[in-house]
Image: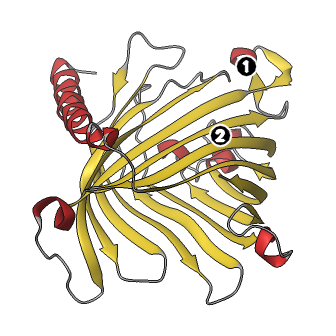
Amino acid sequence: MTKTHMSAGRLGAATLLGASIMIAAVPAMAEEWSDTNIGIRYGTQFGEPYDPDTIKKVIVSFEHVGGYKYGTNYFNVDLLMSDSNDSGGGGRNPNAGAQEAYLVYRNRVDLGKATGGDFKAGIMRGLGVTVGFDWNTKNDFYSSRKRMFVAGPTVMLDVPGFLDISLLALDESNAPDGINGRYAYTVHAALSAAWGIPLGTSPFNFQGYALYIDAKGKNEFGGDSKAEINIDAAIMMDLGRVLGGSKNTFKVGLEYQYWRNKFGNDASVPFSAGGAGNGAFAKTPMIRAEYHF
């Protein structure tokens, strides 16, 4: 990595981090509404780049979303526990599955609420600015230590529930085993959608997210990165409502994730040829349960 690349990466990170700190301070005010849940997911067809085997994972999550005077605040942390096909202990223990923690924080300021203006137009319900960060750590052979800052505009569409579309700048770095220090990728763009839409008057809800992430330049080992497509969607049933108990408390459902060129790795180069192979193209059905409080 050149000095120019390093300086640009640090400058971009500093800019996005500063924006995140300023806007993230807003939720210190009392939230007007919130929804918090503890969830669990299980699937048997996960994939990881440079791993030819399918992987079983249990994912335990803590998720919080809340609304305050000027916008919304979102926080999620996943604890991902793999079977032995995704070796843990830095890849040195083939009998132990890897463990990963992945944290996401997003804060969205609604410009209409913040300025008193009217940003409604046609199907657009409002306009916002989103900032936040991703953070992870994992104890497999790669030993990811991802840090990513995000910022960009968000369009809120006028649908039952919500549908938000964002154009984000991503400033990502990592410090895996095998490199010195922290490597900053080229700042790149992502088009994202997040939704939660009730299916009529039924007890079912369609929820999820979709991401198109542009290529992020050279990776830390000198190879070219690829654009990613990551779609994760679930149909969830309000079990309490169906059984005559408390509504919006216990939810169960089915989830599916489609992730091509995972983490920017080229899924078209076979593992047998030294590439990321099918592990960089995950197509994963899951079962999911949530307890909301």
* Front position in the image: 204 or 228: 204
Q: On the image, numbered disc 1 is attached to which residue?
A: 91
Neighbor class of circle 2 (other Cα within 10 Å; few <14, some 14-19, many 20+) is: few
Coordinates of residue 75 in the picture (x, y in percent): 48, 44
Task: Look at the image and tell me in which quarter the N terminus lies.
Answer: top left
Q: Secondary structure at mark 1?
A: helix
Question: What's under tag 2, amino acid-wise?
Answer: Ala
User: Residue shown at 45%/60% (left/top)?
Assistant: 211
Q: Quadrant of residue 120?
A: bottom left
Q: Which mark is residue 123?
A: none
Q: Quadrant of residue 255?
A: bottom right
Q: On the image, numbered disc 2 is attached to which residue?
A: 273
Q: Residue furthest top?
A: 180
Coordinates of residue 182 in the picture (x, y in percent): 37, 18
* Front position in the image: 280 or 95: 95
Q: Secondary structure at mark 2?
A: helix
Considering only vertical position in the picture, is 7 above or below 204? Answer: above
Q: Horizontally, is 277 left or right of 25 in the view?
A: right
Is residue 176 among what the camera can see? yes
